[in-house]
Image (cartoon, helix red, strand yellow):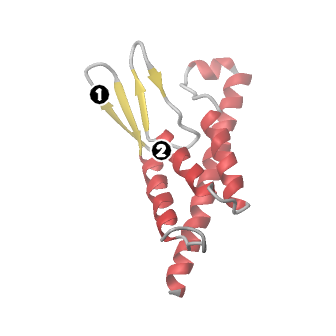
Amino acid sequence: MAGTSFLLSTIRTYALGIMLVDSVIGLGLWIAGELFPPVAATMIISPPYASLFGLLASWLIYREKSGAWFAALVFYALQIPSYYSSDFHFSHQAGLSFTETIQLAHGILVLNYLGIVGLIATVFILLCRPRRNNEPQ
């Protein structure tokens, strides 16, 4: 049982660190795009909402608040899909992304593998976390 606790603690630490780095890089890219418009013209920079939400989730996890890992779940779930077409644009990626681009008939779908891995790690943490006395089994 001690090995499982160590594994869970290690995964929690890495998940928190990656989320924090992802959020800070995303916020830095957004600030750089606002300060240097010629740079922003060559890149598609998402609004800072995902990055700010990631910072909030990281802070909640660090402070061990209840519901913090559910915020991480939402943070990673928002980053997985991005869709670009001539009349619609959906992207809430923060700073880091390893993506697969899929050409569709009406647009481009982008899947973020870092978001998928983060979502899987967060679900694992939520399933393996110790239960409190008032939580249902």
**Mark 2 Cα within 10 Å, few/some/many (few <14, many 20+)?**
some
Q: Given the current orientation, which residue lies at the most extreme left position?
A: 105
Is 81 situated above or below 33? below
State the image coordinates of residue 36 (x, y, percent, origin top left). 70, 22
Residue 77's mark? 2
**Residue at numbered disc 1:** 103
In this rendering, would 32 be left or right of 1? right
**How far is the residue under mark 2 from the one under mark 1?**
21 Å
Q: Residue at x 56, y 79 (%)?
A: 6
Is 34 situated above or below 15? above
Q: Residue at x 66, y 25 (%)?
A: 33
Q: Residue at x 43, y 50 (%)?
A: 116
Q: Residue at x 38, y 18 (%)?
A: 85
Q: Quick check: marks 2 and 1 in contact, CB under 8 Å?
A: no
State the image coordinates of residue 100 (x, y, percent, origin top left). 36, 39
- Helix, strand or loop status at disc 2: helix
**Mark 1 Cα within 10 Å, few/some/many (few <14, many 20+)?**
few
Front-lying residue, 20 or 41: 20
Residue 41's mark? none
Is 50 situated above or below 56? above
State the image coordinates of residue 1 (x, y, percent, origin top left). 50, 87
Q: The residue under label 1 is which amino acid type?
A: Gln
